[in-house]
Structure formats: structure tokens, C-alpha cells
Image (tube, grey):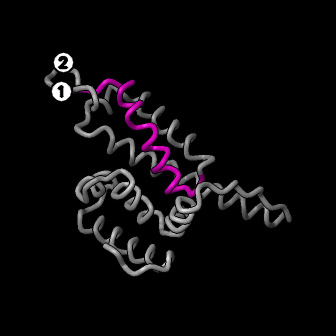
Amino acid sequence: MPAPPRAVSGGKQVVDYEEFYRREFGRMVTLACAVSGSWLTAEDVAQDALLQARQNWDRVGRYDQPGAWLRRVTIQLASKRLRRARVEAAALLRLGSTPTPLPPGPEEVETVLAAIRQLPRQQRAAVVLAYLEDRSVREVAEIMGCAEGTAKAHLFKARASLAQILGEGDQR
């Protein structure tokens, strides 16, 4: 259970950064991996996002939901890394070199993550937030900066796509 927020001047509440970091780091690694498609860069992305939070903690720590801000930054950074990786991969292919493949993880987890990586970026983010972090549709919408209906649409499309990719019926 997270530590209660501590009071600061002006009636605002702020969460202790160290507690925030401990609570959010693993979640950000998972989110970054799902969005970027790479376990190798996920930890770096999570650390970069948390570093930005630390650098702006006087402001971010006073937000009603600093975790939502952190998730938005993590999604942006992971998306940026994904675009960069695609550009680098295309350059390597033009040069005739191929990157070394990652060693596979546990079979079921790797299969599901591979399927999630095939989804569009917004659907990937929505799936991770809703199912891996067990967030409500309202929270998913707030974190992603969209309407609840849009978040529901991302989740609906993601479920349908995952069912097709994994060769299963649409199981809601």
C-alpha cells in the first residue's frame, strides 16, 4: 500500500518521490515494453520517464494523479524509441546487416507480447494500462489524454485484433 501523501504549503498534497519511484518503476517498464516492443529499451525508457518526473517533481508531485503524467511521458518516450529503432533497422537492412534477435522469454508471455506488439501504438498502450495495470477505462482515457469512448474503442479494437492474431474467439 502506497504511503499517504504528505502535506505541502498551499493546501496541496504531494507524494514522496522515492515511494512514487518504487511503486511506478516496474509498471513503467511493462508499459514501455508493450509500446516499444523491446525489453532491451523498456527499462531505459522507464528510467528516462522517471528522471523527467524527478526533474519536475515540484510541479508533478502536486498533480492529482502524477502517475497519469508519468504514463503519458512513458508512452511518448517509448513511441519515440520505436520510431528510432525502425529507422535504424531500415538503415541496417540497406547496409545488408541484420540485428541479433532477442532470446525468447517464457513461451506464453512471449506469444502474447508478440501479439500486443502487432497492435497500433494507441491500442498497445490501452491494453497495457487496462489489462496489465488493471486500470479502469476512465483512468486509461485520462492517462492517454482522450475521451472515455475513444479509450473503449481502442480496447475493443485491440481485443478483436488480439483474438484474431492469437487464433481465438473474441473473449471479452
Write down the region rendered in magenta.
13-38
Q: Are circles 2 and 1 on residues that touch, CB within 8 Å?
A: yes
Q: SS for tag 1?
A: loop
Q: Amino acid at mark 1?
A: Lys
Q: Residue at x 19, y 20 (%)?
A: 7
Vertically, is 115 above or below 72?
Answer: below
Residue 33 falls within the magenta-colored stretch: yes
Vertically, is 27 above or below 79?
Answer: above
Quadrant in which the C terminus is drawn: bottom left
Quadrant in which the N terminus is drawn: top left
The residue indicated by pointer 2 is 9
Query: In terms of image quadrants, where is residue 5?
Result: top left
Q: Residue at x 25, y 62 (%)?
A: 147
Percent x, y of residue 26: 46, 40
The residue indicated by pointer 1 is 12
Query: Left of 130 or right of it: where is 44?
Result: right
Most common SS among magenta residues: helix
Q: SS for tag 2?
A: helix
Vertically, is 7 above or below 116?
Answer: above
Query: In terms of image quadrants, where is residue 124?
Result: bottom left
